[in-house]
Amino acid sequence: MSHLKQTDASFPATPSQADMPADYLSALNEIKERIRTERLRVTLSANAAMVLLYWDIGRSILERQQAEGWGSKVIDRLSADLRAAFPDMRGLSSRNLKYMRAFAEAWPERAIVQEALAQIPWYHHIALLEKCRNPEERLWYARETAAHGWSHNILCLQIQNDLYQRQGKAVTNFTQTLPSPDSDLAAQIFKDPYLFDFLGTADPRRERELEQALIDHIQKFLLELGAGFAFVGRQVHLAFADQDYYLDLLFYHLKLRCFVVVELKAVPFEPEFVGKLNMYLSAVDDLLRHPDDKPTIGLLLCRGKNRIVVEYALRGLHKPLGVADWETRLVKSLPKELKGILPTVEEIEKELGYGG
């Protein structure tokens, strides 16, 4: 019995919330947020230290291979000796040592590793080494991964779908209609073509069929649009001049801080498509745009286009507008986990300055 009393004294009952000071919950939330931030910082710091350590090991192996002709047998022995010396440390397999060597060979300068590459996990680097063609492409994907928090699966999907080659390729008039640096940012956000592989074997022949298919796969469509797009609505009603009009799809872009009207066409580009979309942009600016929002941007997705015809059709327009193809290719599997590419409600509120 005395033991039980001693235990009770050692672990006093938790006071109820009613007994706490008025500012207790606020203080608790501040401390919890601090712990979360520090845990993330420590994790990122540990990852950066590990990536730099792997580069150092790889560099050492590479230099000895070049100077003394180290082969696979030497690396196998090195792996065994290192694992014996550090039995609690993972990542010292012969295969991983060879990746370290390839990593150091791909990035001869330690400074670039420390500045940009140490911010993403090691297994992302393995994917970049295996799947990317040149240093510029590899570095671009590394920076995008760090900026958007892509998972390993998302990164592999973006490489598989040639995002680097498609980014910034839409035909636009942004340099003539948007101030710098907004024009540069907008140009990089829109790509060409857009890949709707998630539609499977479906081949929509009408705009409404395509629109419905995209809504049915809205998360995957947002993934293809890219980071920063928040879905506002489908067939958004606009009334002016005693008539009713309906936008196919309406988005808001968090970094551009503007509405984006997406019009869908199941046929190749025709110049008259531009006039209608230009009208929609003017209407959204007048009817929906907040005073703090930047000019609305239009994106016209067609089933093919002649680039010269598009450039002529956009010339002289005062509204920012881009034109790109959409297409389906061989069906590729999308990762189930899309976290890190779609904005959360909290991120949207933070970007727009709400709730604070």
Image (tube, helix red, strand yellow):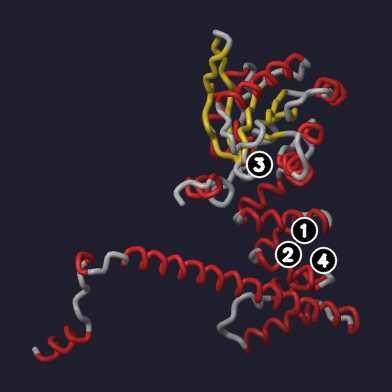
Query: What amino acid does circle 2 point to?
Result: Ala
Expressed as whole percent of the image width and height from the top left, the position of residue 255 reads 64, 45
Mark 3: few/some/many CA within 10 Å (<14, 14-19, 20+) = many
Query: In the image, is 116 to the left or to the right of 218?
Result: right
The quadrant of the picture occupied by the N terminus is: bottom left
Q: Pointer 1 and pointer 2: residues touching (CB < 8 Å)?
A: yes
Query: What distance separates the C-alpha of mark 2 from that of mark 3?
Result: 24 Å
If you read the primary sequence from the N terminus, does the residue marked by circle 2 or circle 4 appear first? 4
Quarter of the image for residue 251 reads top right
Query: What amino acid does circle 3 point to?
Result: Leu
Query: What amino acid does circle 4 point to?
Result: Ala
Between 20 and 220, which is closer to the camera in this rendering? 20
- Which residue occupies 56% across, 39% down? 230
Disc number lying in front (2 or 3): 3
Query: What amino acid does circle 1 point to?
Result: Leu
Query: What distance separates the C-alpha of mark 4 from that of mark 3?
Result: 34 Å
Query: In the image, is 237 to the left or to the right of 297?
Result: left
Between 290 and 158, which is closer to the camera in this rendering? 290
Residue wearing tag 3: 256
Expressed as whole percent of the image width and height from the top left, the position of residue 188 reads 75, 43
For residue 116, the mark is 2
Residue wearing tag 1: 139
Query: What distance separates the C-alpha of mark 1 from that of mark 4?
Result: 10 Å
Query: In the image, is 309 to the left or to the right of 115?
Result: right
- Which residue occupies 54% across, 15% down? 239
